[in-house]
Amino acid sequence: MQTAEISSAQKTHFVKLVCDSIIEAVRLSGSQGAPAGHLYAAMMVHGFSLEQFEQIMGALVRVGELERRGQVYFVKGVR
């Protein structure tokens, strides 16, 4: 069985969907934040490795979408 290649545009779209979903999950956690372990577990069941999780979360923190306090993530500005 032959698989179709995924275009750059499709890859970009999928990465944006993942990032938007993570941000929304953290936002829904409110002022208590979202524990990193819970987020990782949710992503792990969809095939993400710990390294991939750390890269994505690190990028979301670096671009200012999320804050990390200890092992808990918050949407920027939510206290």
Image: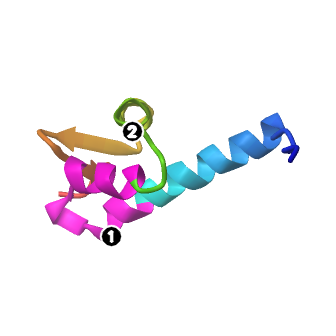
Residue in view at x 26 percent, y 67 percent:
29
Query: Which numbered circle lies on residue 53?
Result: 2
Left or right: residue 60 versus residue 13 is: left
Q: Is residue 75 visible?
A: no
Q: What is the quadrant of the C terminus in the image?
A: bottom left
Tell which of 26 and 36 is nearer to you: 36
Tell which of 28 and 7 is nearer to you: 7
Judge whether residue 29 is colored magenta: yes
- Which residue range is magenta in the image? 24-44
**Which residue type does callout 2 highlight?**
Phe
Q: Quadrant of residue 58?
A: top left
Left or right: residue 74 versus residue 19 is: left
Left or right: residue 33 versus residue 63 is: left
**Snapshot colouring:** rainbow
Residue farthest along the front direction in this orientation:
1
Query: Which numbered circle lies on residue 79?
Result: none
Left or right: residue 35 versus residue 65 is: left
Query: Which numbered circle lies on residue 28?
Result: 1
Residue in view at x 84 percent, y 44 percent:
3
